[in-house]
Image (spheres, rainbow, N blue to C red):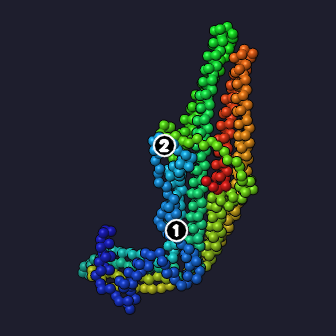
Amino acid sequence: MYRVLYLAAIGIFLAAPVPSEAGGAPSASRLSRLRGHVGTEQRDIPQQQASVQVSGVANATAAEISPTGVGGLLRPRGQAIQPGEILSVDRCVGIGLANHPSIRAGSHAVDAAASRVGQARSGYYPQITLSSGYSKYSLVTDPMNTDVDQYSASATLTQSVYEFGKTWNRVTIQQRFRDAAQADLRDITNQVVFSVKNAYYNVLQARRSVEVLVESVKSFEQHLEQARAFFETGVRSKFDVTKAEVDLSNARLILIRGENLLRVRQAVLNNAMGVADATETEYDIEDTLSIEKLTITLDDAVRKAYENRPDLLAVRAREEAAGESVTLARKGFLPALTGSATYTREAEQLPVDQTGWSVGLTLTFPLFSGFLTSYEVREAKENVNIARANEEGLRQAILLDVKSVFLSLREADERVAVAELTVRQAEENYEIARGRYEAGVSDIIEETDSLVGLRNAKLGLISALADYKIADAALKRAMGEQ
């Protein structure tokens, strides 16, 4: 049936000669110009609209029009890790940005928002529809009935002539939502960067800690050999041997936990880079647990955060969209002028036996809609209030975030200085305790305590260095930087 209707419509339009332009129907050349007009981005907005709407179109960019939009430019491409490659923190960040699925999702969200801008902009263009129909009816006459087949086809063009800039408002609203989506993508990017750096420095901390724990196990093994030698010569009691054995077992248990923690943190790093299936033997990472002294002040950090935080920029963009929605809702009280043109062909059999066309203007004035427009305006105003409250809440959260990570960074800086001194003191204390034990003037507990103290001092320094690097990355994220 659909095929019959389609063929009938084509037959109706092709059977009769094309009327001249003087007769009011569109000629082939005019249709060609119309198709070219619709297909290009260099639009000719009607004069009635140009005075109020052209400013909203003049700033259209290729990114807004492109099917991929801005997100298409940011869409990452995967980066493979070469076997045996030694990765720097920047290389790990690059891998994360290229592979993490959340960034791909954010990029697609930007593309979708850019497409909605194009949807809103379609109101500037004419709308063309083609319809066809078929009906069969019977004429009851004497002495017999007559069956009649009727075919019809029509083409209709409608164009908004003047609507007080409603389309411009719709485009502006969707542009603000697109800006918010771009800011969301920046925020996701910053989160991925921080997650990679956090995991990277946690791996370094765990790896250095394992090195210290391996060294500690070796020291306790030497300590046990020394205790056994003293016991065999009768210098020390059996207690020293059993105490050294217990200390060695405890050191091995701590090492096992440390090695497992390293494997877990390597898996976390793989996940942060978006390569969760990578194995710990495929690559290595550079050891960059060194610090640079803090140079920024808290006030400067807060100021930068208010200027650069993408989540705050996204909230502001949505607030602007909400404000524009109030303007659009108020225009629901205003009339709209629309032009239309229709060309029709009908036939009871082919070829066509009659044609017709019509051109007109329609002025639509909303007299009463059950207070719908009033409530739409009220809702839009409340949405603006919600957006403003969200912005204020976010500003407070940003202030707390910046203060928290700034203080953590300053604390880690102070801890590093103290931990370095503690390591030097612990090394000196251990040398003294070991000499005293070998000389027979102290017991095994003193040497064990000094050895444990040295191990803990080294672990404390490693922890302070890692915390400093993580806090530094967190401060950059809190300020809206990478």
Q: Quadrant of residue 60?
A: bottom right
Instruction: Give the residue drawn at x 67%, y 29%.
Output: 455
Looking at the picture, tell me which residue is in the foreground, 170 or 64. Answer: 64
Looking at the rendered image, the quarter that the N terminus falls into is: bottom left
Instruction: Give the residue drawn at x 60%, y 60%.
Output: 183
Viewed as shown, does residue 353 lie left or right of 178?
left
- Counting from the top left corner in percent of width and height, residue 70 is at 52, 63
Looking at the picture, tell me which residue is in the foreground, 9 or 385. Answer: 385
- Counting from the top left corner in percent of width and height, residue 170 is at 57, 71
Report crowding for label 1: few under 14, some 14 to 19, many 20 or more residues within 10 A (C-alpha). Answer: many
Upstream in sequence: badge 2 or badge 1: 1
Q: Residue furthest bottom?
A: 22
Q: CA distance from mark 2 to mark 1?
A: 40 Å
Report crowding for label 2: few under 14, some 14 to 19, many 20 or more residues within 10 A (C-alpha). Answer: few
**Amino acid marked by disc 1:** Glu
Q: Which disc, if any, is residue 64?
A: 1
Q: Which residue in the structure is indicated by mark 2?
A: 85
Instruction: Give the residue drawn at x 47%, y 65%.
Output: 67
